[in-house]
Image (cartoon, rainbow, N blue to C red):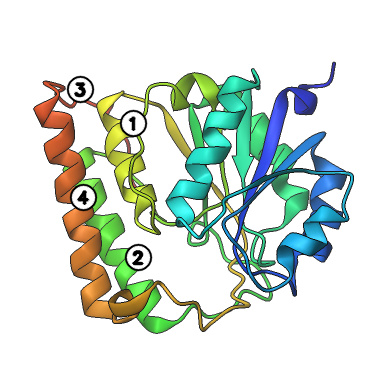
Amino acid sequence: MSKSSRWLAALPVYNEVNYVDDVLNEVVRYAATVLVVDDGSGDGTAERLERRKDVLVCRHSENRGYGAALKTAFDFAIAEGFEGVVTLDCDGQHQPCRIPEFIQTADQADIVSGSRYLKSYQGDDAPPEERLKINRTITRELNERLGFCLTDAFCGFKAYRTSALKQLNITDTGYAMPLQLWVEAAAANLKVVEIPVPLIYLDLERSFGGALDQAETRLRHYRQVLDDAFASVMADGISFPPREEAACN
């Protein structure tokens, strides 16, 4: 049995009819088992997925959120006995050819997180200014509070060992889920490694949902999610273990 066959590739999908087939055609080249979590798409994505015989599909009857879709993927990976799961988006911003690198790096880590800011690649896109500012702000605050040396708090291209997922209590259903994830990971003293990925922005008009499309509102929401995650951990009587001091470049 190959190493990759013990890993699941999982993609949360919501209204990606323009990208889903092209992305999945690439993903199946690099992953033995592929799960698509269709989070209540209503644009024809579900019908495209029904025609495919090379991927597994879990469908939410209604849109529940990015975090909820990932939680479905995590639960599936654990229940089916996979060694780990690689998550990537289905909008063309993540390169499926990098899946093997994530799996290989997970030999030395509990969570492998892609970073769009560790390395510059030829052809990198310029991120929307407000998204970059928020990412940098939250990433800095996360590092200060948790002792991490992250450079990209929000990249969805990740590899998780299922042994690590079993230690996390992920409840946030929205785009802020990664922030709760980092707090939970720190509380469990998980080893986190970042690896560089190209910076690709194809969907510059992504909606975060209602008022969250406003940058300042979104930043306040992210900080509230962080505060709530800390409070939840502390309420359970869990303290944050001292982390090995690392040199942050």
Mark 1 crowdedness (10 Å alpha carbons): few <14, some 14-19, many ≥20: some
Residue corresponding to mark 2 = 135
Q: Which amino acid does the dot numbered 3 rest on? A: Pro
Residue corresponding to mark 3 = 241
Q: CA distance from mark 4 to mark 2?
A: 14 Å
Going from N to C along the chain, the mark reached first, 4 or 2, is 2
Residue at 57% x, 38% y is 73
Nearer to me, 183 or 16:
16
Q: Splitting the image into 4 quarters, where does residue 153 fall?
A: bottom left
Residue corresponding to mark 4 = 226
Going from N to C along the chain, the mark reached first, 3 or 4, is 4
Is 211 drawn above or below residue 30 in the view shown? below
Q: Is residue 182 left or right of residue 152?
A: left
Residue corresponding to mark 1 = 169
Q: Which amino acid does the dot numbered 1 rest on? A: Asn
Q: CA distance from mark 1 to mark 3?
A: 17 Å
Q: CA distance from mark 3 to mark 4?
A: 18 Å
Q: Which amino acid does the dot numbered 2 rest on? A: Asn
**Residue 159 horizontal/vertical position (percent):** 57, 37
Q: Is residue 189 left or right of residue 155?
A: left
Question: Disc 4 or disc 1, which is closer to the eye?
Answer: 1
Q: CA distance from mark 3 to mark 2?
A: 25 Å
Q: Is residue 132 visible?
A: yes
**Residue 235 horizontal/vertical position (percent):** 10, 29
Q: CA distance from mark 4 to mark 1?
A: 14 Å
Q: Splitting the image into 4 quarters, where does residue 7 fall?
A: top right
Residue at 62% x, 63% y is 198
Question: Disc 4 or disc 2, which is closer to the eye?
Answer: 4
Q: Contact (CB < 8 A) between labels 1 and 2?
A: no
Q: Which amino acid does the dot numbered 4 rest on? A: Leu
